[in-house]
Image: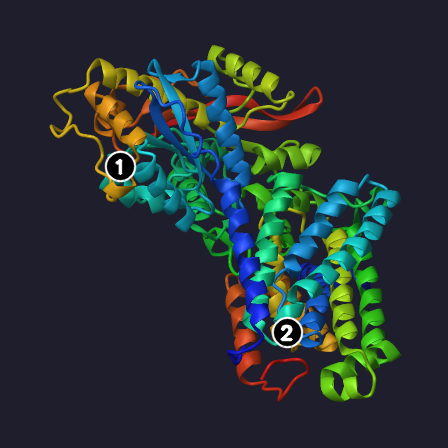
Amino acid sequence: MTPQPTGRRHHRWLTATAAIAATTLLAVAGCAGSSLSDSDTTANEIRIGLIVPKSGPYKAIGDDQAAGWRLALEKLDGKLGGRPVKVIEADEGDGKATALASARKLIEQDKVLALVGGGTADTVQTLYPLLNESKVPLIGMGGRPSTIANPTYLWSTSWLSQETGASIAGYLRTTVGNGRVWVIGPDYIGGRDQIGGFVTAFRKAGGQLANPGGEPTWTPWAPAPTTEFSPYLTKIKEAKPAAVYTFYAGASAIEFVKQYRQYGITTPLYASGFLTEGAPLAALKEQAKGIYTALNYSSTLDNAANRDFVRRFTSANEGKLPNVYHVCAWDAALVLDRAIAEALAQPDPPAATPTATAPVPSNPASSSPAASSAAASAAASGLTSQTLTAALPRVGSIDSPRGAWQFGPTNHTPVQAYYLREVAQDGQVWVNRTVQTLTTLGS
Amino acid sequence: MGLSGLVNPYTITALDGVAYGLLLFVIAAGLTLIFGVAGVFSMAHGTLYLAGAYLAWHLGDGGWAGLGLALAAAVLIGAVGGAGLAAAVRPLTERPLDQVLATLGVAYIAADQFSTVFGAEPRSVDPPRALAGSVSLGGYQYPVYRLGFVAVAALIVVLLIWLVERSRTGAIVRAVVADPDMAAATGLRTRTTRAAVLVGGGILAVTAGVLGAPVIGPAPGVDTTILVYSLIVCVVGGLGSIRGALLAALGVGQILTLGVALVPGAAAFVLAAAMLIALTIRHRPSLAGRPE
């Protein structure tokens, strides 16, 4: 492709420019909107920025997170800590440039008290420096990277990727006895964390891998995610392991399980819960029957909070069952509800930093009168991003549908129970039926 | 005994490579014609595949009627899509970079529309019930649908090679490619020919989506995956060459199956190396439709 000579007919450029302009407008119209209606800003109103994937490959996760968050706000009568809430939504895209632009807009232009969301670990990684710089906390409710050194402004209601595999390793070691386990997963950071967590804990428990060389098998993620698993499945058949352990999510999970069945592999299949959570289970149905997975939630858990949650969710979603993304988003609202109440009751605790001021926007010219008055009134009542952050360690136990949990002091991720689940039919629908509690993990 | 000696993990994997390679060929054949013959740099090819895969999911009912309906719809939508692309890039003739931008824009808008209309969840497409199970090949189970796909794809290969290299239509297309001005001077409608190639390529891509959906199902991001593999096949096979695309697709199919079985972890590297070799060593002077 060489550059073309200039000076071609004028109208062609016009057409192209018009096309590009139209495209841009379409894109902008698709994701702005919500922030434009700014009419009823009351003095007490709190602004929260919800940042989830609304486009791109993780949109399904983002849709679930937004649904879980809205359901919780509905239950709390649209209030957090007794204050009316205005939620401003933004798109995190694939977690890179879009996420950063959206978060900057929420913090600098909308002056939100806190951010909630983050579908993937990439987003959290991208936003982490911005959180430290602006001192606005993020209540993360999705993927969480293993590489966060100082999580002062980062509090996740989800999980650490290594924990899922680690939780089932001891159980699987006992189940297979001296048998070996074949381990396979996708070759990207999330896959390496998920599989690595299992392998480390499994070896520690004295288990051995059936893979050649005793190392896990990685399926390529570049130049495109693997869709063809037959070469690996044929090798598994040859090796005759006692069990297979894997982690895949989304479209890869569907293809992996489908081909596992089509190529007639009869080895028991164990996996990280994402293999059969939400969309993959809905698509696979009976093909997923009998797969054992580990996760920090199952819609069949028998506790009061979960019964209430499932009832509310199914009646709002035509009988559909909730998944772990709904729960983590729901819990993010419970956490903020507690933390805001706590910050209002005790705005200036001894442990908090003395400079309890509103976050300073890097672009003062962008602040609208409404926004600054809201920020001022919030500051007057002692509720700022700073006092909120200082209150987060004091929220205590969260009465979650997954069972009660609280933030760990090191990583600010839940100290929570992990469950062994088996895919089974419950009436017309396929569910991850709880078999037993595996262990409690978190830091 | 002789047969069961032939069936071992590597021949089963190689058979998969053939099925996968033929799927890549049916997808990429349209693109190599669009690139090489019509001279259009289309980044919306994966989008057409994804449209076909969603058709198969939406219209599929587990029987032959659903598949037939999806295939009929694929021809219609492929033709409309191809004609639409032809209209969109017509003002951009001989401006490849602008064609890339324009078709990429179309692909982005379409991807957004797909997830609005069909939902953002990945979908699973089952083949017609008659082809849904697996057969036993010397102790190994093999999906029947893939065997059926190999047969249908082989038919498409023969038809395409005949159409492009033996038929009168193919002769006109090749004439327009070799020397557009001379072809126009002898009374051939070059513009119509180029548009027809885009329509044909569109039909091929959407049809591939319907047939390929049980193997590579519809989900957000699949359009990009398909585009990447198609581009690799086009580059390695040589733009505009059907036979080249066939060899390249079968090669890529083997790299992604037998390759990962023999040398785990090297597949991505081998694919990149194959493209590099194709671009540096093989220099085809003034290949049809390629801008100089």
Q: Which corner quadrant of the image does residue B32 belong to?
A: bottom right
Q: Which amino acid does label 1 sit on?
A: Pro
Up the image or down, A83 lies above or below B103; here it is above
Q: Do the residues labelled 2 and 1 touch (CB within 8 Å)?
A: no
- Which residue is pictured at 86% across the width and 42% down the height? B63
Q: Where is residue A327 in the image (x, y as percent from the top left)?
A: 47, 25
The residue that mark 2 highlights is B93
Marked residue chain, label 1: A
Q: How far apart are marks 2 and 1 (CA)?
A: 53 Å
> Percent x, y for residue A188?
45, 51
In this picture, is B276 found above or below A98?
below
- Which residue is pictured at 56% across the width and 72% down the height? A10
- Asked if residue A8 can be seen in this view, the reply is yes
Quarter of the figure with the N terminus of chain A: bottom right
Quarter of the image for residue B132 reads top right
Residue sitting nearer the eye, B20 or B103: B103
x and y, in percent, of residue A83 in the image: 34, 16
Residue B249 placement, left or right of B176: left
Relative side of B258 to B74, left or right: left
Q: Find disc 1 in the rendering and name its residue.
A: A151
What residue is shown at x 56% (from left), y 77% (from top)?
A8
Task: Return the chain for callout 2.
Answer: B
The C terminus of chain A: image quadrant: top left
